[in-house]
Amino acid sequence: MTNSFNFTILFSAFFVFVSCQSQGRATESIPSQPNILVIAIDDLNDWIGCLNEHPQVETPHLDRLASQGILFENAHVQATFCAPSRTSLLSGKMPKTTGCFEFTPRYDQAESLKGHDPWPMWLGESGYKTYGGGKIFHEGTGAGWTAQSFQHEIPSGPNPRPEVMQHWPVRVWDWGAYPDSEAEMGDFKLAQNTRKLLEKTHEQPFLMVAGFRRPHVPLHVPERWFAMYPEETIALPEIPADDLNDVPHPEVGLTSHRAPEHADLVEKKLQRSLTQAYLASISFVDHCVGEVMQGLETGPNHKNTIVILWSDHGFHLGEKQHWAKRTLWEETTRIPLIITGPGIQAGQRIQEPVGLIDLYPTIADLIERKPPAGLEGISLMPVLKGDPDFQRSPVITSLSVDDHAVRSRDFRYIRYSDGSEELYDHRTDPNEFNNLAGDPKYDTLKQELANYLD
């Protein structure tokens, strides 16, 4: 009891210290040549504590990071799964411009991106020492041309999988408690090695990117993370049986050989088990984020380092009777986006829509360099400097060359290649249960949102 009480006092004191430090940033200015620490998380949806989208999720490190700076509550991706989303955010160009809607062409294979450096490479050419590890480009950091974006690789390694599948016959979609310790996880090795780098003194400004793979499937993390969420207690999303009756394309999403069918999971009584594995994986990667942030906060670089945390897309956990991604609904497109650091006022929550497409021009403004030509996002620097009147036009997400969603502050508009539509009012329908596209009183609004696609 005494040891537990002493730990509580020490943790509370540390939390107060960090909170005071972060609150003090409001009076500082953003350094002209800040270090930039980027934390990328694969397949993390909006189920983190500070976004309040799942009542049981435990993400203390992500929540604390959000409290230290800006949480963009309405942040969205520009493509609906890993590879094209990462190509878009790293290039600062929309999928419709690059032609990258699938696994191929890769960034280095796309004719539309010849001579256009991704921002890690551009920062390296702008005087930054660049470090990268894990999944940043879809191919990681060690494959082909993308390896040139980072001057130094941060060691990580794969996340191990059991030899015998535990819950599902498709190996990439299996889940369960494995291995015995996080020390065996490539993600945790990446976190430790990033922490060690942050504890060192660096003679020139650095870019450091740690790309974590969980909660991407297969959802294997050690047992202690599963134990946080007893399966029988798992709260499931609200999933009306008739939810797809008013949508024109209920078939969108990953095909059945790539992801479990919702009806199949319900029939096999595996919905709670798979949801438990996703929650466990979120808390595991939150632990990895905490490891990285410990290195920053206790090392010599915290007074001059901007932290940017993002995910490459969201993830359905049965909503719209879908699992995984590749849809134009909120569960696929909405992601956590957090920016903190010196000169950034703590505790801000921004409800205006923003996109990952905005990161490249923002980074250029942070280092006070003219960005490459052709970037299609807008700089978020006014938000970082505390502009209370910041507004952005609606954000576009593309499923294919002719299937797109437009997300404004209050509405989601979807138009498919055959001209069919969906419209949702997030002020009254955050779960997107009621498609308003067929109601004539919304025709003017639909046209206004559709104009952004032209």
Image (cartoon, rainbow, N blue to C red):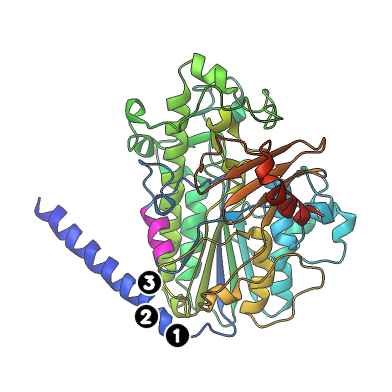
* Residue 138 at least partly seen: no
Mark sitting earlier along the chain (2/3): 2
Residue 220 in the image: above or below residue 112? above
Residue 50, given in percent of the width and then of the height, sits at: 41, 54
Callout 2, which amino acid?
A: Gly
Q: Which residue is mark 2?
A: 24
Q: Residue at x 34, y 38 (%)?
A: 224
Q: Which residue lies at the image location 88% right of the left edge and 58% below the top edge?
A: 112
Q: Is residue 157 toward the left or the right of residue 83 in the image? A: left
**Residue 326's image quarter?**
top right
Q: CA distance from mark 2 to mark 3?
A: 17 Å
Which mark identifies residue 28? 1
Q: Amino acid at mark 1?
A: Glu
SS assignment at label 3: helix
At x 77% / y 55%, what residue is drawn?
A: 451
107 relative position to 78: left or right: right
Relative placement, left or right, of 96 versus 330 is right
Quadrant for the C terminus, please: bottom right
Secondary structure state at the residue bearing disc 1: loop
The span shown in magenta is: 60-67
Identify the main secondary structure in magenta.
Answer: helix
The residue carrying mark 3 is: 298
Q: How far apart in space, not on screen, are marks 1 and 2 (Cα)?
A: 7 Å
SS for callout 2: helix
**Which circle, 2 or 3, is nearer the viewer?**
2
